[in-house]
Image: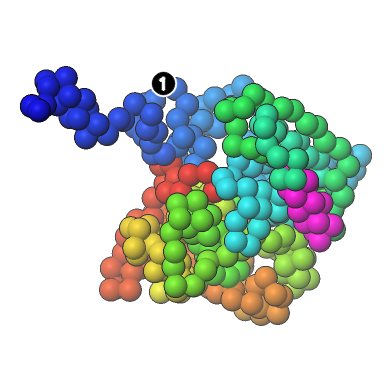
Amino acid sequence: MAESTAERTRAADRSVPDFSGWTCPAPLRDQPRIVMGHGGGGALSAELVQHVFAPAFGGATLAAMADSAAVTLGGARIAFSTDTFVVRPLFFPGGSIGDLAVNGTVNDLAMSGARAAYLSCGFVLEEGVGMPVVARVAEALGAAARAAGAEVVTGDTKVVEAGHGDGIYLNTAGIGLIPDGVDIRPQRAEPGDVVIVSGQIGLHGIAVMSLREGLEFEVQVESDCAALGGLVEQMLTVTPDLHVLRDPTRGGVAAALGEIATAAGVGVAVDERSLPVPAPVAGACAMLGLDPMYVANEGKLVAFVPRDRADAVLEAMRAHPLGADAAVIGECVEDHPGMVVARTGLGGTRVVDLPLGEQLPRIC
């Protein structure tokens, strides 16, 4: 029987992708509405904070734009930070949203030199999520807090209608004391500083993406999710004069370096050959067309250290389990202030821009 005009039209419609539900993690920058890229930790995120939130809230402490706020209360210097976690899937090789919620906040405090003491936790649960899933996440969160030496002392729970969440969203906030004589903030980066990364990069982003997208590699990639407080304490025993610490989460090492260069008004030069990129991450990035410098980490830090203390700090880092693969990756320079450049393996130089959105959305 001959195919009708209506049938041919329906067949043609099925062959054309429906773009109406698509979202772009890195859209045009003049968007009048919030898009996924605003949560990616790149330029769009920075613009949202600088042009919407910072003017609304005000205050010099917020203007520093550090991983945690350093404030004085009752004569004590306290680091205070909060973070929200919307990772999908909830469980992944090497961790879960519960581990992330603790370690992400603990690490933000550590980037000010503080060891986390107390945490709050807010659960946003989607109607219909299984109680065993909630219990498993809660147990992981509690275990991670105990491992980090912190105590969860307050919290909140909300439930949203089915279809309005990804099962569980978490928010954690934390406080900790900053040791006397420690002044760690992005504005302290200066020419001559040595740039050190604490270990292999890109593991968390690739681990989450591979599970979510059903990708298989020869070797399973596991997240590096870990609490960095102990590593930072070991670094501070060598010198309290660490200029900058930053955990390169969303936007990876590239975003962290770019933010520091902008905050301090200095240039950063990186040697790509010195970047500790593990073979599975390098292979996955080559296959997917990604740059390992932009892939998220959840258990690494970048340090800007005075040149005369760099060797001692590097040795102390390598003596700690979370810094065994620490490596010098570059230096802080007077040239090209506010810009990060990378020396390539072919002897050329390329600009490492702050990412617009995020290569791998929803990984923390």
Determine the image quadrant of residue 358: top left
Judge from the rendering whether residue 290 lies leftward or rightward of residue 90; answer left or right: left
Q: Judge from the rendering whether residue 284 lies leftward or rightward of residue 13; answer left or right.
A: right
Residue visible at 68% across and 36% down?
129
User: Is residue 157 visible to the viewer in this orientation of the structure?
Assistant: yes
Give percent across and percent down for residue 277.
Answer: 47, 70
Residue 256, percent across and down? 53, 53
The residue sitting at 45% across, 55% down in the picture is: 214
Mark yes or no: residue 197 visible.
no
Name the image quarter holding residue 114.
Answer: bottom right
Q: Which residue lies furthest to the front in this view?
A: 1
Q: Which range is magenta?
A: 134-148
Give me the residue at 35% from left, 58% from top: 288
Identify the residue at horizontal 68%, vertical 29% (top origin). Answer: 127
Q: Which quadrant: the N terminus? A: top left
Which residue is denoted by mark 1 in the rendering?
A: 32
What coloring was used for the rendering? rainbow
Q: Nearer the viewer, residue 53 or 304?
A: 53
Count of number-bearing discs: 1
Q: Which amino acid does label 1 sit on?
A: Pro
Secondary structure that dominates the magenta span = helix
Check if residue 142 falls in the magenta segment.
yes
Identify the secondary structure beneath mark 1: loop
User: Where residue 194 appears, x then y in whole percent?
Assistant: 55, 68
Magenta stretch contains residue 40: no
